[in-house]
Image (cartoon, rainbow, N blue to C red):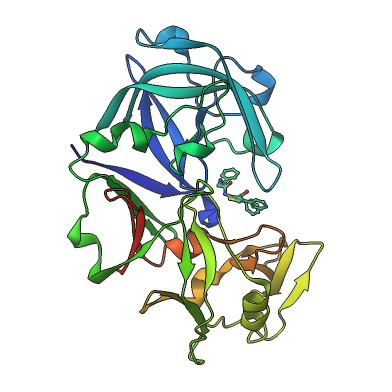
Amino acid sequence: DSGSARASPEQYDIQYLTPVEIGTPPQTLNLDVDSGSSDLWVFSTEMPASSVKGQAQYDPSKSSTAKRVQDATWNITYGDNSYSEGIVYKDVVNVGGVSFDAQAVEAATAVSQTFTTDANDDGLLGLAFSTINTVQPSQEKTFFDNVASELDAALWTADLKYHKSGCYDFGVIDDSKYTGQITYTDVDSSDGFWMFDVSGYGIGNNTFQSTSFQGIADTGTTLAMLPAQVVKAYYKQVRGAKLDNSQGGYVFPCQANLPSFVYGVGNARYEIPGQYINYAPVDNDGTTCFGGIQSDAGIGFAILGDILLKSAFVVFDASENVPRLGFAKK
Ligand SMILES: O=C(CNCc1ccccc1)Nc1scc(-c2ccccc2)c1C(=O)NCc1ccccc1
């Protein structure tokens, strides 16, 4: 079995949304496929109407295959202190043609303001490792863990694009989506993330620095949160850039000519074009812009979010004893 689902960007590529069918007859919700968390949770008819502003809601009472998981609850808080919580159903879930008939669908009963204000985002589909799923008293499996044994290959791929729709594929590597070789690197999943070693970095045409650091491949995080020293060195090359704590990070004049950022995976080198690193204006007149590369200070590891992932074709491969990540140019 294999499948393919679209990943459509919201404004500034803040996140990418993928249509997911839930229940019988199918209810289509647009979810944020998130390799940085492991809960599949949705806006639902179980939450107060005041928390719903345009989102589609999963209605288990309208699904003949929905079954309540008695006494099961969940709650999750993300690094920006956004959170959601609720109860659990089992139901049919279909992503890009790959289906599982008893997927834990975590129906929200409450969400934070940040989720309520994002009208197009109906929930998250977590594809990190099931060891960090938040359902209690017994943890549930991610959609990928549930379908892996049915897939032609136990892997999924991310082909995210700059200000354009891309794809998430399941069970197959589509060779038309990348050029050259795929470079693989082992994943340390002990913290539940797709965590690996970045072998070094380079700024524009400057010499590549072979200082490795650990990071997670996180399709759910917008920006690339990198070691403070790396980020400081990057913005030193940007005239007018400064760390503005009131904005929460490095900003620069929107007209700045940003250098590219090169990152290493093993002996391979991948480049984020400077244009991708001009994330979005922070003011109405578009004079000052917020950087797509920011510091990972206080997190404990780097977060290689969409700003970085959209520069490559990425393989999330759990087909062997040790999971691994593959990167290729495209
Ligand atoms: O939580 C995730 C992946 N989910 C991101 C997401 C998607 C939709 C809504 C909210 C969040 N990734 C990870 S792993 C570790 C962290 C983290 C980040 C900062 C401090 C502590 C932990 C995060 C995370 O929260 N990512 C999202 C994020 C938001 C704002 C700033 C940085 C990162």
Q: Is residue 260 visible?
A: no
- Place of residue 24 in the rendered image (x, y in percent of width and height, measured from the top left): 33, 14
Q: Quadrant of the N terminus?
A: top left
- Place of residue 320 in the rendered image (x, y in percent of width and height, measured from the top left): 28, 51
How many badges with numbers are in the image? 0
Q: Is residue 15 visible?
A: yes
Which residue does the image show at 65% across and 59% down from the upper left? 300
> Position of 267 compared to 116: left or right?
left
Could you say which quadrant of the image residue 91 lies in?
top left
- Place of residue 128 in the rendered image (x, y in percent of width and height, measured from the top left): 46, 44
> Position of 196 compared to 182: left or right?
right
- Indicate whether 192 appears above or below 109: below
Residue in the foreground of this view, choosing between 34 and 330: 34
> Position of 211 compared to 25: left or right?
right
Q: Quadrant of the C terminus?
A: bottom left
- Indicate whether 284 appears above or below 11: below
Which residue does the image show at 66% across and 69% down from the upper left? 289
> Position of 138 compared to 298: left or right?
left
- Indicate whether 47 appears above or below 81: above
- Place of residue 71 in the rendered image (x, y in percent of width and height, measured from the top left): 57, 11
Residue in the foreground of this view, choosing between 21 and 156: 156
The extreme front residue here reads: 321
Could you say which quadrant of the image residue 302 lies in?
bottom right
Which residue does the image show at 48% across and 70% down from the upper left? 198
